[in-house]
């Protein structure tokens, strides 16, 4: 069991490092390649949508049928909706805080910076939980390359979309007049919550088995909302110039995740 928690810690540390790598673009470039970032966001959203079913919802239903007296479809549906509602409430909390800061107006530049970092940091919590829960689902299984592929691919998808998120924090900070080093430091710090959330998610499902089906469904709901509400619209910003570039990234990401999960079971 401790081994599973360590795997979750390692995976979410990697997702954090990709945030740091994205933040590091401020050290070398004035602005990142928008076309490449859109492709990465599209690919990541495709991976996350596919992973939400094959790596989270499907195992949640199977586990619920095996260990719970409550119908599996009830647990999966409630967990999925709870994850989406959690992300929606989180977004509303950010918007509410933003309005409060705007009304106070002590320092508009500082307000923008606080909201930028807060929104990305809050966004990273369910992502870390999703990775941790996915690894926690390995409880009772023989640890092998095949068994960890599903959890690992979720981590890869989240890591890929963390790269542009890191850049999305550090580059605006640089434009606001912060030094390159400080912009990088604040940008990578937004991803530090992922290892914490990942370990917490893994520990919960490892030691409280009955929680696993709900937790897997919860993570799926959070991931779907993030992918549909944030990643897909973001990657389609240059749709007029490149109408299918980011869309093909979504298709490729979905197909890749589906291929790996179905092939490796």
Image (tube, rainbow, N blue to C red):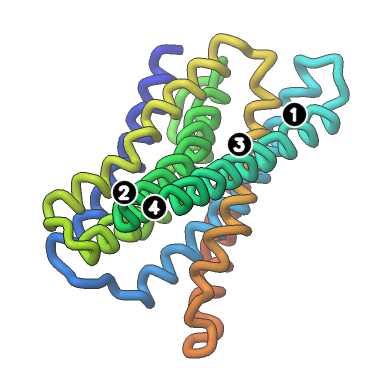
Up the image or down, 151 lies above or below 169; here it is above
Q: Badge 4 is on which residue?
A: 105
Q: Badge 2 is on which residue?
A: 19
Labels 4, 2: front one: 4
Which of these two is toward me, 153 or 173?
Answer: 173
The residue at 76%/15% (across/down) is 67
Q: Earlier in the sequence, mark 3 or mark 1?
A: 1
Q: CA distance from mark 4 to mark 3?
A: 36 Å
Up the image or down, 120 lies above or below 240; here it is above
Secondary element at image label 1: helix
Q: In terms of image quadrants, where is residue 26?
A: bottom left
Residue 219, which numbered label?
3
Q: Is residue 253 visible?
A: yes
Q: Earlier in the sequence, mark 4 or mark 3?
A: 4
Q: CA distance from mark 1 to mark 2?
A: 33 Å
Label 3 packing within 10 angstroms: few (<14), some (14-19), many (20+): many
């Amino acid at each position: 069991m401790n081994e599973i928690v360590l795997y979750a810690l390692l995976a979410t540390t990697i997702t954090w490092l990709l945030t740091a790598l994205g933040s590091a673009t401020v050290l070398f470039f004035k602005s990142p390649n928008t076309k490449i970032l859109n492709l990465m966001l599209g690919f990541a959203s495709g991976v996350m949508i596919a992973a939400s079913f094959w790596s989270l919802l499907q195992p949640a239903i199977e586990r619920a049928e095996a260990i719970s007296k409550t119908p599996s479809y009830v647990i999966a549906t409630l967990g999925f909706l709870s994850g989406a509602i959690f992300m929606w409430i989180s977004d509303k909390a950010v918007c509410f805080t933003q309005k409060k800061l705007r009304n106070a107006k002590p320092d508009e530049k500082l307000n923008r910076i606080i909201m930028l970092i807060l929104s990305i940091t809050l966004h990273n919590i369910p992502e870390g939980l999703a990775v941790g829960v996915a690894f926690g689902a390995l409880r009772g299984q023989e640890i092998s390359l095949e068994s960890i592929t599903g959890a690992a691919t979720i981590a890869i998808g989240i890591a890929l979309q963390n790269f542009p998120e890191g850049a999305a924090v550090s580059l605006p900070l640089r434009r606001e007049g912060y030094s390159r080093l400080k912009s990088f430091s604040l940008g990578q710090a937004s991803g530090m919550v992922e290892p914490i959330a990942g370990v917490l998610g893994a520990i919960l499902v490892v030691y409280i088995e009955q929680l696993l089906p709900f937790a897997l469904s919860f993570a799926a709901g959070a991931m779907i909302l993030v992918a549909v509400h944030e990643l897909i619209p973001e990657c389609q910003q240059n749709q007029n110039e490149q109408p299918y570039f980011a869309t093909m990234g979504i298709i490729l990401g979905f197909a890749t995740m589906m291929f790996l999960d179905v092939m490796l079971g």
